[in-house]
């Protein structure tokens, strides 16, 4: 809790996945992938309550074992491939009830995030009065590695101006989203005007959606710079 303000974390973990079947319950570094998000949330000093939104019995069993039994079964219309995460958050807020100052979205597909990433993003949103905060990571290569391909197929080096722009370019990594519920539900996005970026190191920013990404993430676990345990 931050000076009397309440923080709700939502972990959306539907069972279906077109590219990686049952990915949230699949074993990653010895645990179901969703468990690593719950491990990071457990280490947070600012989350007041956490709810796992799932239709998957295996995910529900993992959450229950770790101390967060899902208070509801995610309905079918929020569990398909076209389901909106904002709709899932709205449903969770309705089901949990109460008044919350911040809602934090923690997607299970970012298992390398650390507790300090969660708390850093929440603190940034609170300190600045921003409507929302989204975690980002740098490009995987320095700016000198990037350029353009011309219409004739020629490689065009970035040049000083382009390099300066690339040095400021980041990628939304999907690890932590923080928003004020009233603004989030009004705009139906975390990218409201005034959204701030919370930088995370590349080694904690892996987003898992495909079998190849899953395999790479599994290999990265021994090298992650994190305080989670």
Image (spheres, rainbow, N blue to C red):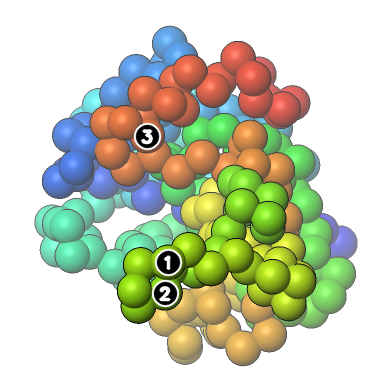
Residue 42 numbered tag: none
Q: Residues within 10 Å of mark 2 (few under 14, many from 20)?
A: few
Residue 211 lies left or right of residue 115; in this view the side is left
Q: Looking at the figure, which quarter contains the C terminus?
A: top right
Q: Residue 72, how many percent across, how many down?
A: 30, 48
Q: Residue furthest top?
A: 30
Residue 154 numbered tag: 1
Residue 133 lies left or right of residue 24; in this view the side is right
Residue at the image position 42 percent from the left and 66 percent from the top: 154
Question: Which mark is in front, 1 or 3?
Answer: 1
- Mark 2 and mark 3 lie on one chain; the one further toward the N terminus is 2
- Residue linked to disc 3: 213
- Residue linked to disc 2: 150
Q: Residue 39, how many percent across, how many down?
A: 58, 28
Residue at the image position 65 percent from the left and 78 percent from the top: 195
Alpha-carbon distance for marks 1 and 3? 30 Å
Circle 1 sits in a helix, a strand or a loop, which is it? Answer: loop
Q: Residue 218, how many percent across, how many down?
A: 45, 20
Q: Camera-side residue: 201 or 181?
A: 201
Residue 182 falls in which quadrant of the image? bottom right
Circle 3 sits in a helix, a strand or a loop, which is it? Answer: helix
Circle 2 sits in a helix, a strand or a loop, which is it? Answer: loop
Q: Camera-side residue: 94 or 23?
A: 23
Residues tagged 2 and 3 counted as in contact (Cβ below 8 A): no
Q: Is residue 217 above or below residue 77?
A: above
Viewer can see residue 65:
no
């Amino acid at each position: 809790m931050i000076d009397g303000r309440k923080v709700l974390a939502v972990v959306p973990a539907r069972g279906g996945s077109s590219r990686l079947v049952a990915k949230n319950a699949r074993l990653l570094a010895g645990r179901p992938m969703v468990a690593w998000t719950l491990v990071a949330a457990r280490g947070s000093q600012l989350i007041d309550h956490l709810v796992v939104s799932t239709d998957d019995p295996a995910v529900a069993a993992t959450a229950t074992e770790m101390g967060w039994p899902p208070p509801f079964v995610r309905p079918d219309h929020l569990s398909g491939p076209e389901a909106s995460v904002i709709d899932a958050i709205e449903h969770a807020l309705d089901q949990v009830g109460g008044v919350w100052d911040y809602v934090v979205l923690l997607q299970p597909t970012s298992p390398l995030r650390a507790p300090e990433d969660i708390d850093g993003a929440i603190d940034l949103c609170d300190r600045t009065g921003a409507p929302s905060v989204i975690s980002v990571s740098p490009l995987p290569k320095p700016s000198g590695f990037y350029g353009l391909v011309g219409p004739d197929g020629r490689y065009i080096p970035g040049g000083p101006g382009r390099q300066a722009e690339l040095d400021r370019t980041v990628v939304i990594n999907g690890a932590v989203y923080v928003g004020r519920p009233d603004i989030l539900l009004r705009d139906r996005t975390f990218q409201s005007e005034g959204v701030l970026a919370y930088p995370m190191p590349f080694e904690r920013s892996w987003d898992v959606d495909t079998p190849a990404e899953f395999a790479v993430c599994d290999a990265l676990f021994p090298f992650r710079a994190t305080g989670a345990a």
